[in-house]
Image: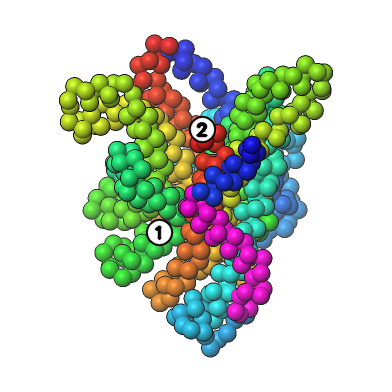
């Protein structure tokens, strides 16, 4: 296990290093002079020169990168151009909001996707299988921001059941918090539920073809027991790991969902930063998102080995 | 004796869902190309006498906050979406397929370097990277297409690499090598034709993803700029009038949903038709 972890970590580090080069390189795509963008209305050459020196824009790219990455590894992601606050602190404030939304979305996705996948596999090529497939494909094809708008129209505007936007933290009032996040969490979980359903279905179909399932049936066990205790337990391995990989989809989806429901999370932070041309925040968010994603991938790999004894021995 | 391509076509047309998807895709492409002739009104002509009118015989999908005909804007919006879908996937395939072919054929250090770069790009969630790229390049449909294309390239690289490694083990590739053909010739003449099928499947599914991505970027204001119509930007402005004019949000969203669903159906159908295990 130690050797496996070591090998995986050895792969993660170069990936993160390349991500950092990619994120740093983004700044080079910016049309015009970053100092001018930062100075805003200010056109005084002295001020511009001072900004260039401060940001080391007058130094070679490699030096700029070395300086930047040196600070990043110490947790210093720079300062927001717009609100003059450390980017790391800004991200730290927004991350719990998105984490709550993401967690709820994932629970919803598991609650819909896994049972639907099992039902679909058990009724292979039957009506329920086709129906689940159609619903799944529709879920994958629905842009989540449109689904969000339609839910606001139906549930908030027409029925008046839930607030259309805003956010209340769990610590403040858990009931209000759930009321403000349940709709966005459903929107976010919808696409992942469809993906999980597909994974579960195919993993269940493979598991149900195995000898141990045939043996369980031959022993005279009830069908639901065969499906849940024997087939599903084994199908769970690929579903867990593939499911963990979908957390990237979740982070992407959060950007739009938070925008539609005006939730002050991680996704809204990057969109606001983009419009305020607050590039250090954009870079910080991309870097942190990638690090989280790479970390989750690593976790998924470790989980895969932990829950699959055959791989542990190997 | 039938060619594999003909067999694949026959298998594809045996799937009703795929055929329906193809018909819908064809309809969208046709509408996009002939938008000028099909649209009943000018999509950017404002009219102060027809502000936020509900759907009627004259305006089938109603009118928007500037009195513009929603149907005409949805029709012209198809242009931006189809263009973005095709162009960004062409960019993605243009970058990803040659690098994937190179990585899968050359193996060794080349494969490792290309693989690591692709890993790094895939480590950033798709939309986050596309937003960051579009933000730094500046908001426009062209830049949105470039951002989506570059972001989607590593997926094509992975598909092409896998298919290349698979094809490179064939005996005729060994034979071509043994005959003394230079490596580039073996790769282009003997391996490349074998990776076409998975690349086509990936391209069809990627168009669906690219249409959603373009709509997402336009929804955020990073794609097609007003007053030019795009489904995403129409949804953005529709949000402000949700209780007074819900039709503004229903129709452009339904158009995105239908177009994406149709490309997904065609992609799924192609995958089943081209997958030898499906025989």
Image quarter (top left, top right, bottom left or bottom right) of the N terminus of chain B: top right
**Chain assignment, label 1:** A
Q: Is residue A127 left or right of residue B58?
A: left
Residue beneath label 1, please? Answer: A148
Numbered tag placed on residue B118 in the rendering: none
Find numbered disc 2 in the image and state the secondary structure of the residue it sits on: helix
Find numbered disc 1 in the image and state the secondary structure of the residue it sits on: helix
Q: Nearer the viewer, residue B81 or B216?
A: B81
Q: Quadrant of residue B144?
A: bottom right
Category of crowding for the residue at label 2, using alpha-carbon neighbours closer than 10 angstroms: few (below 14), some (14–19), many (at least 20)? few
Task: Examine the rendering and report whether any part of residue A98 can be seen.
Answer: no
Q: Is residue B218 left or right of residue A111?
A: right
Secondary structure predominantly adopted by residues drawn in magenta: helix
Q: Quadrant of residue A112?
A: top left
Residue B182: image location, x then y, percent: 82, 23
Compute the Cα span from label 1 to label 2: 39 Å
Residue beneath label 2, please? Answer: B277
Residue under the point 74% across and 19% down: B175
Q: Nearer the viewer, residue A279 or B231?
A: B231
Magenta-colored span: B15-44
Task: Examine the rendering and report whether any part of residue A59 can be seen.
Answer: yes
- Please tell me whether residue A133 is drawn above or below residue B220 in the rendered image: above
Q: Nearer the viewer, residue A144 or B75?
A: B75
Residue under the point 55% across and 34% down: B276
Residue under the point 70% across and 53% down: A36
Assess whether residue B22 is covered by the magenta stretch.
yes
- Please tell me whether residue A76 is drawn above or below residue B66 in the rendered image: above
């Amino acid at each position: 296990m130690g050797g496996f972890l070591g090998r995986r970590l050895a792969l993660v580090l170069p990936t993160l290093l390349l991500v950092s080069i990619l994120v740093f390189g983004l700044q080079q795509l910016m049309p015009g002079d970053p100092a001018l963008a930062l100075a805003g209305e200010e056109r005084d050459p002295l001020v511009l020169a001072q900004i260039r020196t401060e940001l080391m824009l007058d130094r070679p790219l490699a030096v700029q990168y070395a300086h930047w990455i040196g600070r990043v590894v110490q947790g210093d992601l720079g300062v927001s151009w717009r609100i003059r606050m450390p980017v790391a602190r800004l991200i730290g404030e927004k991350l719990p909001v998105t984490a709550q939304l993401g967690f709820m979305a994932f629970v919803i996705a598991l609650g819909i996707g896994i049972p639907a996948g099992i039902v679909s596999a058990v009724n292979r090529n039957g009506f329920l299988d086709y129906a689940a497939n159609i619903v799944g494909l529709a879920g994958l094809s629905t842009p989540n921001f449109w689904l969000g708008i339609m839910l606001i129209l139906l549930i908030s505007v027409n029925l008046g059941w839930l607030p259309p936007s805003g956010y209340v933290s769990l610590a403040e009032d858990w009931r209000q918090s759930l009321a403000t996040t349940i709709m966005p969490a459903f929107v976010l979980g919808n696409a992942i539920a469809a993906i999980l359903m597909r994974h579960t279905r195919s993993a269940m179909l493979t598991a149900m073809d195995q000898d141990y399932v045939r043996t369980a049936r031959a022993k005279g066990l009830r069908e639901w027991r065969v499906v849940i205790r024997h087939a599903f337990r084994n199908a769970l391995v690929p579903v867990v790991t593939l499911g963990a990989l979908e957390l990237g989809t979740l982070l992407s989806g959060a950007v739009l969902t938070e925008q539609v429901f005006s939730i002050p999370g991680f996704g809204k932070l990057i969109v606001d930063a983009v419009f305020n041309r607050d590039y250090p925040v954009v870079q910080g968010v991309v870097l942190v998102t990638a690090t989280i994603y790479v970390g989750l991938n690593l976790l998924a790999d470790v989980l895969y080995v932990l829950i699959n004894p055959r791989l542990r021995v190997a | 004796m039938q060619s594999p391509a003909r067999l694949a076509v026959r298998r594809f047309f045996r799937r009703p869902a795929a055929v329906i998807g193809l018909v819908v895709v064809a309809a969208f492409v046709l509408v996009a190309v002939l938008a000028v002739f099909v649209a009943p009104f000018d999509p950017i002509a404002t009219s102060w006498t027809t502000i936020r009118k509900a759907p009627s015989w004259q305006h089938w999908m109603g009118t928007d906050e500037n009195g513009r005909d929603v149907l005409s804007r949805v029709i012209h919006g198809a242009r931006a979406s189809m263009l973005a879908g095709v162009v960004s996937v062409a960019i993605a395939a243009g970058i990803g397929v040659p690098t994937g072919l190179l990585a899968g054929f050359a193996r060794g250090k080349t494969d490792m370097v290309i693989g690591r770069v692709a890993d790094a790009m895939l480590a950033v969630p798709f939309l986050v990277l596309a937003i960051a790229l579009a933000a730094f390049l500046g908001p426009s449909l062209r830049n949105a297409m470039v951002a989506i294309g570059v972001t989607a390239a590593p997926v094509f690289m992975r598909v092409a690499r896998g298919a290349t490694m698979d094809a490179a083990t064939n005996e005729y590739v060994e034979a071509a090598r043994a005959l003394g053909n230079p490596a580039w010739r073996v790769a282009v003449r003997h391996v490349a034709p074998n990776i076409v099928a998975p690349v086509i499947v990936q391209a069809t599914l990627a168009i669906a993803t690219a249409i959603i991505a373009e709509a997402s970027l336009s929804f955020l204001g990073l794609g097609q700029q007003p007053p030019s119509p795009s489904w995403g930007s129409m949804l953005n402005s529709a949000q402000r009038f949700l209780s007074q004019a819900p039709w503004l949000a229903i129709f452009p969203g339904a158009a995105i949903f239908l177009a994406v669903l149709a490309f997904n159906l065609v992609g799924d159908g192609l995958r089943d038709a081209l997958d030898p295990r499906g025989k």
